[in-house]
Image (cartoon, rainbow, N blue to C red):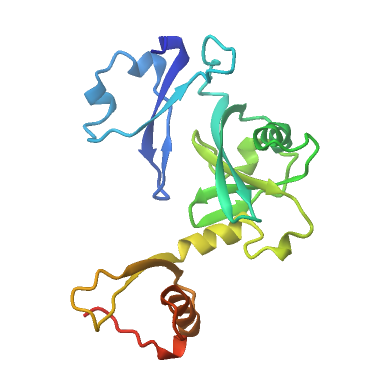
Amino acid sequence: KYPVEQIRVWPFSARTNQTCRPTLIEPEADLQKTMAVCAENLNPWNVFVELVPPDSGLTALPPFDKDTDVLLFFKLYDPKNKKIHYAGHHYMPVTAKVQELIPILNERAGFPPDTELALYEEIKPNMVEKIENMTEPLEKVLEELMDGDIIVFQKEERDNEIYELPTCRDYFKDLFYRVEVTFCDKTIPNDPGFTMELSLRMTYDQLAKAVAQRVGTDPYLLQFFRCQ
């Protein structure tokens, strides 16, 4: 069980760019309302529940000023393994400079404090923009700064090009084109088949080679049919 001062509920709300991000419940205006009113009759009602981390030593969540602070979420991109990792959240003053995030992000990632980072704003899953000006305040750099904005970061490395997806922009573009395709053997009645994750950017030859490797045969001995 958590004391009231160690928990904060952030309901998700839809944005104009078709994403959902958490928003603050107004302490004075909303806390006396019923859940039905706050949820606006949504079922299910999706919320982000913020809790005091057990190992933080804090007895209450830090204060949050809706007029001067912003809730940011962080993701770490690992180009070597082509993976995105959740890196927590943090309150920042809207007037704070972007570069003030660097030591916070390095600590979250377990990097040395002086590690150079590349930062991106995730506008929506298939759209990320690199943050170029690190000395400007967040309210000027991030487009329509709001609670729930997401910063994706990675090491600023000169040899990133050795990786298949060197930047998080490449990763999200690849993710956008990924699809799951189920293949069934037409010679076997009611064959349940198997499913593979492929890319819409694949050529026919790449598709054939991927499937051939999966079933252990020559790609030139395969013929594909669309479901009718």
Return the x and y of residue 64 as percentages of the image width and height. 53, 19
Viewport quadrant of the C terminus: bottom left
Give whichever of 177, 211 is nearer the camera: 211
The residue at 24%/18% (across/down) is 34
Q: Is residue 197 left or right of residue 174?
A: left
From the viewer's perspective, is 6 left or right of 31? right
Q: Position of residue 82 (x, y in %)?
A: 59, 56
Residue shown at the point (22%, 35%) measured from the top left: 43
x and y percentages locating residue 185 in the rendered image: 28, 79
Q: Quadrant of residue 55?
A: top right
Identified at 48% across, 53% down, the residue is 125
Furthest-bottom residue in this view: 220
Question: Residue 174 at what x, y percent from top left?
Answer: 52, 63
Residue drawn at 23 percent across, 79 percent down:
188
Q: How many marks?
A: 0
In the image shown, does 80 or 4 lie closer to the viewer? 80
Q: Quadrant of residue 204?
A: bottom left
**Which residue is outermost to the front?**
216
Figure quadrant of the N terminus: top left
Determine whether, in the image, residue 20 is placed left or right of residue 80: left
Compared with residue 215, is residue 171 higher up or lower down, i.e. above or below?
above
